[in-house]
Image (cartoon, helix red, strand yellow):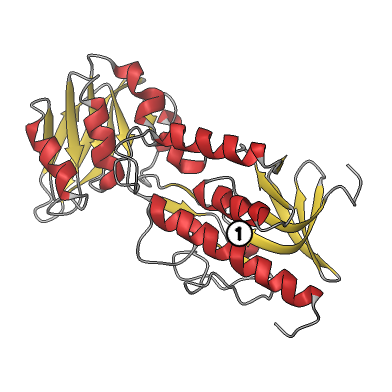
């Protein structure tokens, strides 16, 4: 592409719900927009087997939601750049996004909607089990454990949704929660209580892996209050203990909180004029599908106002 072809009103880093919503609002406002992501459309929502708390929709899978949004954007002729962002630069009044494959995208404004990656257990040796015994997506990898015994680490909405989905596939599920109770929705807790093949252990953390020779055999867990250790025999395990933002690349342009999330108020403005933030990578108290799309709309409309004010020569 030429530099002109790679120049837009709004660049959006991240193709999850926040980024897709930002593109939708930008395009419908008559602005050109490009989503830049290393995987394309979807983000973390594609790993949710069942979404029941999105207004106006009784039930859907996260993958269905992402596909419908992608179709909506493609019908509006949205541009998509596939690549991993490695640098942000300023060229006059334009922001530049550089990707590892050498592509450069220019925009009057930039919306960071980079989301977050799965949080891991932080236990020595866990890397060797990722993708073979340790997984993060029940929809993607649950069928590998049909009629088998698994453990699931976590107690929030995502963890409980995963457990409910897996209970239809697996023989037995042991939920390990480090807190005294689940933090997920009451409705989900009620469903968990009705599943005879799910047992739950509270106030407990995973300490190590049980390995015989080179074979994975289960998890060793420890009660936080007493230190009492218990072995859980299982064929594999799923981890659903939250997300970690990957905002380091943006640190020179935005302020980050102690957890690495980008600091911005509900208006989604960052400290740098023309740079906005939306979705799970923003510092906030609630991270849900609804708040992600809300951020996306807010950030896009703010970016559109910023562009219009620049064009009209008004002070931002």
Instruction: Give the residue at x 18% y 28%.
Output: 173
Whether residue 4 is visible here, answered yes or no, is: yes
In the displayed structure, 111 sits above or below 232; it is below
Name the secondary structure under disc 1: strand
Residue 113 placement: quadrant: bottom right
Pointer 1: residues within 10 angstroms few (<14), some, or many (20+)?
A: many
Left or right placement of residue 245 versus residue 147 in this view: right
Left or right placement of residue 201 versus residue 125 in this view: left
In the displayed structure, 223 sits above or below 145; it is below
Left or right placement of residue 253 versus residue 151 in this view: right
Residue 81 placement: quadrant: top right
In the displayed structure, 103 sits above or below 274; it is above
Number of marks in picture:
1
Can you say which quadrant of the picture contains the N terminus?
Answer: top right
Left or right placement of residue 239 versus residue 316 in this view: left
* Residue 112: x %, y % from top left: 61, 59
Instruction: Give the residue at x 60% y 65%.
Output: 301
Residue receiving disc 1: 112
Instruction: Give the residue at x 83% y 49%.
Output: 6
Q: Nearer the viewer, residue 228 or 303?
A: 303
Whether residue 153 is visible here, answered yes or no, is: no
* Residue 59: x %, y % from top left: 31, 36
The single residue placed furthest to the top in the displayed view is 147
* Residue 190: x %, y % from top left: 11, 41
* Residue 287: x %, y % from top left: 38, 57
């Amino acid at each position: 592409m030429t530099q002109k072809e790679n120049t837009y009103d709004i660049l959006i880093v991240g193709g999850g719900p926040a980024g897709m919503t930002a593109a939708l609002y930008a395009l419908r406002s008559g602005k050109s927009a490009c989503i830049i992501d290393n995987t394309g459309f979807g983000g973390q929502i594609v790993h949710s087997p069942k979404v029941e708390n999105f207004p106006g929709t009784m039930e859907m899978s996260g993958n269905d939601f992402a596909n419908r949004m992608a179709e909506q954007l493609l019908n509006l002729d949205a541009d998509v750049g596939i690549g991993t962002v490695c640098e942000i630069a300023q060229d006059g009044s334009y922001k530049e996004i550089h990707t590892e494959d050498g592509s450069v995208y220019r925009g009057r404004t930039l919306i960071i909607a980079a989301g977050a990656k799965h949080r891991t257990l932080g236990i020595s040796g866990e890397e060797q089990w990722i993708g073979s015994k340790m997984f993060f997506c029940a929809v993607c990898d649950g069928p590998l454990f049909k009629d088998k015994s698994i453990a699931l680490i976590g107690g929030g909405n995502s963890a409980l949704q995963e457990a409910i989905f897996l209970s239809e596939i697996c023989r037995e599920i042991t939920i390990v929660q480090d807190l005294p109770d689940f933090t997920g929705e009451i409705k989900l807790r009620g469903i968990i209580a009705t599943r005879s093949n799910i047992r739950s252990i509270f106030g407990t953390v995973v300490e190590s892996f049980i390995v015989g020779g080179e074979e994975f055999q289960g998890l060793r867990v420890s009660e936080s209050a007493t230190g009492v250790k218990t072995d859980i025999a299982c064929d594999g395990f799923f981890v659903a203990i939250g997300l970690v933002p990957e905002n380091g690349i943006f640190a020179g342009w935005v302020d980050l909180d102690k957890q690495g999330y980008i600091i911005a108020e509900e208006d989604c403005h960052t400290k740098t004029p023309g740079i906005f933030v939306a979705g799970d990578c923003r510092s906030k108290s609630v991270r849900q599908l609804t708040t992600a799309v809300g951020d996306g709309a807010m950030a896009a409309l703010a970016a559109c106002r910023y562009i219009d004010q620049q064009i009209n020569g008004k002070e931002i």
